[in-house]
Image (cartoon, helix red, strand yellow):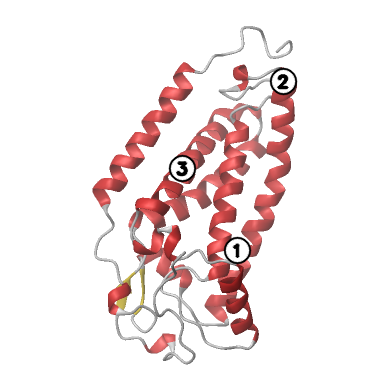
Amino acid sequence: MTTLENHRITSPASYREAATFRRVWDWPTRLVHWGLAASILGAYVSNRLGASYFSLHLFFGYATIVLVVFRLIWGVVGTRHARFVNFLEGPRGVLRYVSAVGRKRRTRYAGHNPLGALMVITLLLVTGAQAALGLFGNDEIFNLGPFAGLVSKEASLFLTSLHRRLFYVIVFAVVFHIGAVLIHVFVKREPLILAMITGRKPADIVLPEEAIASSRSLLAILLFVALTAALIFGLDVAPRPDTDIASF
């Protein structure tokens, strides 16, 4: 597996002194990032509001599925820094980065650093699994997930239990992620939050040849439309339980 070329330096210029910015993150990657954040929060709030908001809870679950699947595909066909091959590193790369941080050496990554890359994959997997499990959910009172009819009641209840438990894993991952970002922003003085909003990083972090020229917008839009249509079709053809929820 290859990594970003020449992405480490031991003493880069101060991040605050950069006079120009170069684009690193395409808008689809940023949309997925903030869209997942909104969907996780929305799913939590709608669940806390009660059974009458179940349809809204489902909407946020559907949004999560589309966003996660899109990001996984975009990790193969997307722009340079969105592709997994350009930021995922093996154990040696991760340990080398952790060692450099521990020795307070400056590091420079145009895209994700190795630990950030692991967090990206972790969040995609756990949020995707959480949303997928919810499709088979059953609260035994009022509501069923749209795919609950595909499995037995026992299986539905088991998957619902996993769905609930996985929430705590997501909370832990999100808290860890936010904490790591805040350390980078306020301790290492790396503008990670601003970069994920604007798509740009200071020029002393991103070499000219590392900047992206476009977001591949047409491909991204077509992919979003295709995934949304596939989800709608799947929901439409999924069998529904023939009995009421109490006997399902």
Q: Residue at x 43, y 69 (%)?
A: 111
Crowding near pointer 1: few (<14 within 10 Å), some, many (20+)? some
At label 3, the amino acid type is: Val
**SS label for mark 1:** helix
Q: Tags 1 and 3 in contact by the CB under 8 Å rule?
A: no
Q: Position of residue 43 (x, y in %)?
A: 58, 41
Q: Is residue 232 above or below residue 108?
A: above
User: At numbered mark 3, what does the secondary structure look like: helix, strand or loop?
Assistant: helix
Residue 49 in the image: x percent, y percent? 64, 36
Image quadrant where residue 55 sits: top right
Q: Residue 177 carries which label?
A: 1
Q: What residue type is labelled 2?
A: Ile
Q: Residue at x 62, y 40 (%)?
A: 130
Which residue was labeled with disc 2? 141
- The answer to which of marks 3 and 2 sits earlier in the sequence is 3
Rendering quarter of residue 155 = top right
Vertical placement of 122 versus 111: above or below? above
Please identify the quarter of the rendering in which residue 54 is found: top right
